[in-house]
Amino acid sequence: MNPVNKDVLAVLTAIVTVASIFSTAYILLPTKSNHYVAIGLLNQDCLIGNYPDQVYNGDNITYCIYVDNELDHAALFQIRYKISYERRYLPSESEPSPLPAKGVWDVLLDKGRNITMRLTVPVELDQINGTSERAALIFELWQLDPNTGGWVYTGRSVYIYITVKESPLR
């Protein structure tokens, strides 16, 4: 008497065959991967929320900036800090802000790596109309193009609005 039924053996063989085909296809076929870079803004304690909402003109303010490299290679990034009190100067996904950078930081990240950096930035407006002015503090992410040796805007940026008050000491 045979302890294994022929029907059971046929079903088990079919399952193993199908599983082998799917496993081989999964290993051999290229997988779609998402390659991207990211930038994020955190408060002075490197946490989300509780962002300072006002500062005196000429003072410094501290934020943490998160940069993530999910490209398939290491890359040199640059964070450019700018200030704008006009909405038309905000960056988009296709164009950086045309304003000059008031601060620049370089960071080299291997593929799949990220970093959180604490940055202290100056908040200086040329003029304040009245006692205060609403301004956007802009942080743009740029990447070095190894082929040209020039910096390329990644289309990634963050900004936060803050009230800049006239300093009582000036």
Image: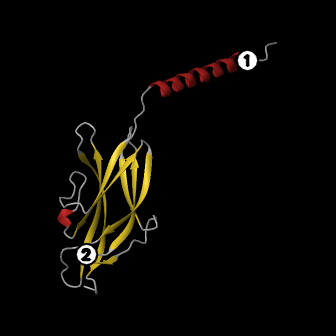
Q: Amino acid at mark 2?
A: Arg
Question: Is residue 154 found left or right of 68 in the rendered image?
Answer: left
Q: Which sits in the foreground, 132 or 80? A: 80
Name the amino acid type tagged 1. Answer: Asn
Which is nearer the eye, 10 or 57? 57
Quarter that holds the C terminus: bottom left
Asked whether, in this view, residue 80 is left or right of residue 27, the answer is left
Left or right of 164 on screen, residue 47:
right
Residue that sits furthest to the right in the current view: 1
The secondary structure type at the circle numbered 1 is loop
Kindly report the distance in space between the C-alpha atoms of the residues bearing marks 1 and 2.
Answer: 80 Å
Numbered circles on residues, count: 2
Classify 10 Å Cα crowding around label 1: few (below 14), some (14-19), many (20 and above). Answer: few
Q: Which mark is residue 134?
A: 2
The residue closer to the viewer here, 41 or 146, is 146
Q: Is residue 24 above or below residue 92?
A: above
Please give the residue where the numbered disc 1 appears in the rendered image: 5
Query: Closer to the N terminus: mark 1 or mark 2?
Result: 1
Residue 34: image quadrant is: top left
Furthest toward the bottom, the residue is 168
Residue 138 position within the rendered picture, expressed as x and y whole percent measured from the top left: 28, 63
Q: Residue at x 61, y 22 (%)?
A: 16
- Colouring convention used in this rendered image of the protein: secondary structure
Residue 66 in percent (x, y) is at 40, 56
* Left or right: where 90 falls relative to 29: left
Q: Give residue 36's quadrant in the image.
A: top left
